[in-house]
Image (cartoon, rainbow, N blue to C red):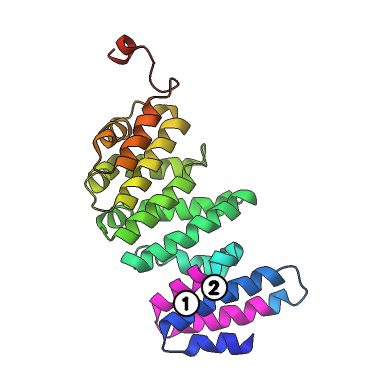
Amino acid sequence: MMALLKMYESKKKQLIYAASELVGMILNSQASEPCFPDLLKHCKTAIFANEVRERHDVFVHSIEGASREYSELLSDRQIFMKTISFIDILTGSMRAAVFKTYERYVKVARQNNNLAAIDEIAMSLVAVSKEILADINDENQQAFTSLLITLQELKGVDSVEKLLAIVVPQLKPLFVQNKSEYSRGRFYDLMVNLYDRYEHYRSHPAVQGALVHGLNDSSKMIRDKLAEFWNDQNRLDLDPQSRLQ
C-alpha cells in the first residue's frame, strides 16, 4: 500500500489518477477491518500532499478517482470541506470532477439520512450557480446536469428545491442548441424527471417548453424518446381533441 501511495509524489498526473481508483478499491475492501482508520489516514495524507503543493487539479481528480470505488470518501469531514471549497474556484473538467464526486456522495448521504451534508452541497451550488451556468465546458455541463438529476430525487428537501428553482429556468438556452447529443440527452432526462416528480414543473414554461422543443431535436434517439414520453396517456390525453385544448 505504501508503494501505491508513493505514486502521489509523481509528476505524471495520469499515473496518480489511475492509482487513486485503486486506492478507492482498497479502501472499499478494507472498510470493515480494524486497520481501516490508519489506512484512511495514510491515504488522506498522500492525497492532501498535492493540495499542499497547490496541485489542485491533482487533488480533485484524486478524490474523484478514489470515490468511484469508495463513495463514502466524502464522509470524512476534512475531505468534504476541502472539496466543497473548490466549487467557486475551479472550472471545466476540474469542476466536473467535483460534481461527479458529489453525485456519488449524495447517494451515500441519502442512504445515511445525512441531510445536513446534502444541504451544504445544495447551498454551495446555489451560491455560485451563476458561475456554474456560465461555464460552457461540455464536461462541466454534463456533470452538473447529472448531479441535478440525482439531487432532484430528494423531493421535499428545501435546499435542493431552492437550487432547482434558480437553475431550471436558465437551462433550456444552454442545452437545446448544444452540439453534444449526450449533453442534450442528459438535459432532457432532467426535464422528464422534473415533470414526473414535481407537479408544479408540469406547467412550468421552461420544463414544458423544453420537452416540446425536444420533439424536433436533430437526434432521432432524443426525438423518439420524447415522442414516447408525450404519448403516455398519463401525460397527454390520447383523445386528439383533448390534446388541442
Of helix, strand and loop, which one carries label 2? helix
Q: Amino acid at mark 2?
A: Glu
> For this rendering, which residue is in front, 80 or 150?
150
Residue 200, magenta (yes or no): no
Observer able to see residue 182: yes
Residue 196, above or below 175 = above
Residue 207 placement (x, y as % from top left): 33, 34
The residue segment tinted magenta is: 39-65
> For this rendering, which residue is in front, 239 or 132?
239
Residue 171 placement (x, y as % from top left): 29, 44
Residue 43, magenta (yes or no): yes
Observer able to see residue 201: no
**Count of marks overlaid on the render:** 2
Label placed on residue 21: 2
Q: Which residue is mark 1?
A: 17
Residue 231 placement (x, y as % from top left): 39, 24
